[in-house]
Amino acid sequence: MSAVVAPAAPPRAAAPAPGEPAVLLGVDIVEAGRLARAVERGGEVFARHVTTAAEREAAPEAPAFAVKECLIKAVGGRAPGFAWHDFEAVAAAPDAWALRLLDEAAAELAASTGVRLDGCAAYAVRGASRDAALQRLHPGEPAEVAGVARWGSGGGLSAALAIVYVDRKGSARCPR
């Protein structure tokens, strides 16, 4: 059960007001047991399919599937050429404004679901997913795309929330 279903033909993001960055938002809420069963059934093959080697080394128990599902929803779905490795957790973190925006949305999601979103990671967005995001955020111009996600579980649910945006600077640290 997912809270948000990506549209077949994603609409373009509205142009932001001057000085305001555009963002894409994705949410994934799933029954925690269902997710645990999928991970258990798929084992190492599932982990290799969904995560990169660097992600498995850095955080082998991270909820990659739910987080990447919400990143997929943020960019508008699985674009032609999509690969799970289009999204990779990275050490560099988002712009401070992006983290503030995500924290506000996470507080709203936590209030409505009872799930505290205490996990956090920054993501590089590459390949077909980067191209899909740019089509919606910054049409016609090359740019770097980044994402940041928060996740948590409780009350039998696993919830993840992510924003994707054009990365206009290098890095601050994503607090834990």
Image (spheres, helix red, strand yellow):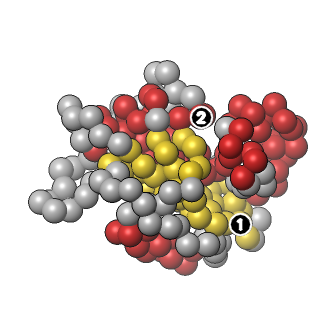
List the single residue furthest toward the front: 170
Residue type, numbered disc 2: His
Q: Is residue 10 left or right of residue 45?
A: left
Locate residue 153 relative to residue 92 in the image: left or right.
right
* Nearer-the-camera pick, 143 or 20: 143
Q: Residues within 10 Å of mark 1 (few under 14, many from 20)?
A: many
| Residue 114 showing in the rendered view | yes
Q: Residue at x 77, y 38 (%)?
A: 47
Q: Which mark is residue 85?
A: 2
The x, y position of residue 157, in whole percent, is 71, 63
Mark 2 falls on what kind of element?
helix
- Select label 1 or label 2 by which is in front: 2
Q: Which badge, 1 or 2, is on the more N-terminal residue?
A: 2
Q: Residue at x 50, y 57 (%)?
A: 92
Residue 6 visible: no
Q: Measure the C-alpha gap from mark 1 to mark 2.
A: 23 Å
Mark 2, residues whose alpha carbon is within 10 Å: few (<14), some, or many (≥20)? many
Spot occupied by residue 114 in the image (x, y as percentages of width and height): 64, 75
Question: Along the horizontal axis of the image, is 134 left or right of 57?
Answer: left
Residue 153's label in the rendered image is 1
Determine whether the residue tagged by mark 1 lies in a helix, strand or loop.
strand
Q: Is 110 in front, or is 65?
A: 65
Which amino acid type is marked by label 1? Ser
Question: In the rendered view, would you say 131 is above or below 12?
Answer: above
Quadrant of the frame with the C terminus: bottom right
